[in-house]
Image: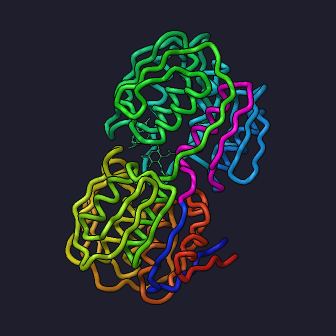
Amino acid sequence: MDKIRIHGGHPLSGTIKISGSKNSALPILAATLLTREPCTIHRVPDLSDTNYMLQILKHLGAEVERASGTVTVAAAKIDSVAPYDVVRRMRASVCVIGPLLGRCKEATVSLPGGCVIGDRPIDLHLKGFEALGSAVRVEAGNIKVFAPKLTGAVINLRGKFGPTVLGTDNVMMAAALAEGTTVIEGAAQEPEVVDLANFLNKMGAKIEGAGTRRIIVEGVKELHGAEHDIIPDRIEAGTFLVAGAICGKGVTIKRVEPEHVQAVTKALSNCGFKIESTNNSITVSPNGVAAPLELATEPYPGFPTDMQAQMCALLSTTGGISVITENIFPQRYMHVAELKRMGAHVDLEGPTAVIQGVDRLFGAPVMASDLRASAALVLAGLKADGITEVSRVYHIDRGYEHLDEKLSELGAQIERVKG
Ligand code: EPU
């Protein structure tokens, strides 16, 4: 298995370009199943997760072509069954259920297994499908959803941890081909939901209100092919901003949507870093001594859970006591034990991490446990004295396009060791 080896302590500077968003690309690729006509999607990041999604689409009968960042999917005839072997590697496979249900009026998809960041139920997705008139059964590890016809309904998708991103996507996709009007209350407002709604509208759907808590979908009889550019990845952008903060002397990220990363730039600015933005670039630079912070993860536009681990790494190296509360996935702290092995002082009290900043971190062999935890370990390695080796790099490859190469462009001493 590959490792990433980092010789810490080399300051970063320069400019990198942000890739297309993983969490937009996955549901948008799934949405191509809603039409028999070809769809062309640009800026699909080259990640193992997007490749898994393309494999799932192929398994379901779609013809898929990929030329660099452009993917063409033609789903003229499709099957509605996605077995365990095909979907087990990626939890986001659940977002094929909505389009299969919309198009075929039935879907059998293997239930996603456990997830290291905590319990990840799909009860809200299923509640939405039921409200549209489907029956839902769990049989032999599969979810079977079927309906003679889908009928628009008023559905509240807010759960005890707030709105659900893929649940909103799934219900929106099924409702696009339902009879009548669906109102999704308590909808997720994430930019990725808006990107999906924009793509669906290009396909002929009638969706209003994406980006607010209430989405209205007027069902149509059929959808047609469309072409779309995926939005920039706000979590990749945030991760590079934190890289620039943790050991940069002026790092600029380009091809970013500054509004989408406002919670991160605000946190970095409160921490004392200098942030300069244009309409599609952000520069982070040091500005004296960095201060501790109190942060809580929230649904968009709040501070994203997908940036919590990276922020833990940064706050481990700024003076004073910082406090982070994880409200979306309260157990998402797999990075903490590994950061402690590098010299960080972090105490976990339930969903809250109390971080006492230290002067120095030390390089160590560490193990990646999930995508964002791995990114946090790489960031800590950039700052640490000596050599850090991050193993299980496949977690990073799930969601960051060429992370090591991009950091290397900024001056990091980082290499991938084949294993
Ligand atoms: N939840 C329920 N029931 C459901 C669905 C969700 O209780 O039916 C709970 C979850 O357990 C969690 C909260 O609701 O506590 C929010 O989960 P959500 O459904 O929004 O998560 P998701 O849609 O499965 C997406 C991203 C995640 C990101 C979360 C939160 C994709 C492919 N994944 O997951 O991204 O953390 O939203 O913003 O879009 C990542 O990229 O590293 C990643 C994990």
The answer to which image quadrant residue 383 occupies is: bottom left
Instruction: Tell whether 290 sits left or right of 27.
Output: left
Name, please, the residue furthest toward the bottom.
Answer: 386
Q: Is residue 23 magenta?
A: yes
Q: Nearer the viewer, residue 83 or 413?
A: 413
Visual colour scheme: rainbow
Report the side of 255 relative to 331 (left or right). right
Vertical placement of residue 88 versus 6, above or below: above
Q: Is residue 36 above or below residue 277?
A: above
User: Which stretch appears magenta?
Assistant: 18-46
Where does residue 203 sit, x and y in percent of width and height? 62, 26
283 sits left or right of 391 in the view: left
Is 159 placed above or below 271 here?
above
Position of the C terminus by quadrant: bottom right
Which one is nearer the viewer's eye here, 157 or 269? 269
Q: Is residue 35 above or below residue 405?
A: above
In which of the image's four quarters is ligand 1 placed? top left
Image quadrant in which you'd find residue 98: top right
Rendered residue at 37%/59% (across/down): 277
Residue 227 drawn at (x, y percent): 65, 35
Q: At which x and y percent is residue 359?
A: 29, 85
x then y, percent, for residue 85: 70, 44
Q: Can residue 187 be seen in the rendering of this structure?
A: yes
Residue shown at 63% from the left, 36% from the top: 30
Which residue is depicted at the point 48% across and 66% down?
375
Q: Which residue sits furthest front?
A: 278
Is residue 181 shown left or right of residue 81?
left
Q: Residue at x 59, y 68 (%)?
A: 393
Which is nearer the eye, 194 or 161? 194
